[in-house]
Amino acid sequence: MTDIEIPYVEDRGKLYRFFEILPGLSSWLVLILPIILALISPYLTAFFVIGYILIWFCRSIALNLRVLQGHKAMTLHMGLDWTKLLRDLETPADVELTEQQKPLKWHGNNLRRLIAKEGNYIKPSEVIQLVIVAVYNETLDIVEPTIQSLLNSKYNANQVIVVLAYEERGGSQVAKDMQYLVDTYGREFMHMTSVEHPDGVPGEIIGKGGNITWAAKQFVPYFEKHQIDPMRVVVTTLDADNRPHVSYFACVSYAYVICPEKLHTSFQPIAMYMNNIWDVPPLMRVIATANSFWYVALALRPHMQRNFSSHSQGLSSLMGTDFWSVRTIVEDGHQFWRTYFRYDGQHEVFPIFVPIYQDAVLSATLKKTLKAQFIQLRRWAWGASDIAYVAKKGFFTKNKVPKGDLILKFFRLYEGHVSWATQYLILAYSGFLTVYLNPSAARSYFVANELPVIASLIQRVALIFLLATTYVTFRTLPPKPARYKNWRYIGIGVQWIFLPITTVVYNTFAGLYSQTRLMFGWYIGKFDATEKAVKK
């Protein structure tokens, strides 16, 4: 499929609008359903509530187990000597292939595969990492540590090209700061430059997608001039506050070299919102930690993986999709679908069990921080807009995408957004709703007395599994800044008491907000960058 663009608003017909309405309509119907059932029959409500809570209970257990498994895998991969592993891939025939012991049995299998290719593959020394750092109006306090983290990487900086993609609308000081970084650090890399994204490019909405796409297109002539095969280039996009783990580029280079389908694969690291976790208020800490653990668990389910935030993809693959969309504020998740349809369903996301550390939401004041957190989550929730795109391109446009795979992926996308906007509210009120709405329920001992008890008991048992989450929290914390006393550990340990507040006030309401706006055609027409502050 060659036409992979999101249609402009004026070009969206009734069918497209139906699927834009669908997620919001479904979410509101799900929320209203317990009320309707309570008015009809208290027993119907009881079965609905218990069934829903049991499904949530099973998912909660599975999630916490995957967090533990994912943390174990992440710890293993962070501790590996990826530099040595890359050297082995350079000359696999020279490596003594004894019976490999766990956990490196997979490395031996990869070496055997490369030996069978008799040198006909891209070697690690031939891979070039193009890193595009998206900047809006962030200060040097935010961006410079990101550049320093690239230099601290356990990877040859002479194979790294850095492009600082900044916005004209960010102001003249941003341009000066980017030039300062190029002058200061440029000699340390294979190449480093800054590219200004003009304001008001026709056909673009204000967003990150337009910025990084503009930068990538401006830089493609560099590879043509130096006769560098795009298949040798891996492109990684970073936000201004993103700090890759020291082994990330070596790890993604390893994955790219051994990948048999480079054109049809993107690589997703684990997003960990830990850079400033000691500095943010408790509510933001809970949200940042919960989001981090969600991506740790998701890495164990490759069939559920989608591009999110920072990710890597081959330059040839990106050129085939004309890079990222400039018509959506969720260019990261949308890039999966864009690539999926461009290559007729031949696209997978390969998990990288090495993190890229990011900032939790922190603004100048508590009030601004609380607001900024909601704005960030509602932007993520705007991914529900992809439901209409996937339906239109997958089911109503001629394509060669395998229909069984498409149906499964579409259902997961649709169900995921509806659950996002509904599950925590239903858990919060449905167990007690029947008694208040249906007087006859009060005469039923089971409905009036046992149902709330059963609902509360299941939820309390599920909370026990927060012990696993708390354990991983302390294992993943960065070192405590000297400005904080040891008692702050106590606050981090008990922060999960705020989980019911964050899940309802932030996750649920952000999902409902975005889906309701989409339902009524009140489109979010620009990328609201999260305001960032630094504590010193």
Image (spheres, helix red, strand yellow):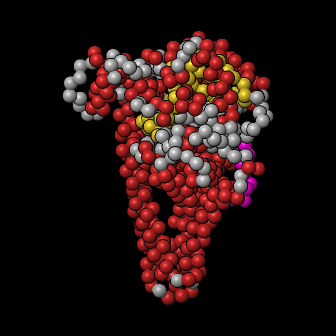
**Residue at image x 43%, y 64%?**
55
**How many circles with numbers are drawn on the protein?**
0
486 falls in the magenta region: no
On-image quarter of the C terminus: top right
Where residue 338 sits: x, y (%)? 58, 41
Q: Is residue 533 above or below residue 124?
A: below
**From which residue to which does the magenta span run?**
519-526
Q: Is residue 89 left or right of residue 188?
A: left
In the foreground, 525 or 506:
525
**Residue at image x 71%, y 52%?**
12
Quadrant in the rendering for residue 136: top right
In the foreground, 71 or 225:
225
Q: Is residue 470 above or below residue 215?
A: below
Q: Is residue 104 visible?
A: no
Task: In the displayed orientation, state which residue is furthest to the left.
Answer: 99
Where residue 360 sits: x, y (%)? 58, 40
**Residue at image x 56%, y 14%?**
227
Q: Is residue 434 above or below residue 51?
A: below
In the foreground, 260 or 151:
260
**Residue at image x 48%, y 72%?**
49
Q: Is residue 474 left or right of residue 144?
A: left
Task: In the displayed orientation, state which residue is furthest to the top.
Answer: 187
On-image quarter of the N terminus: top right
Where residue 108 sits: x, y (%)? 28, 27
522 falls in the magenta region: yes
Q: Is residue 234 visible?
A: yes
Where residue 391 sits: x, y (%)? 59, 53
Secondary structure mostly seen in the magenta stretch = loop
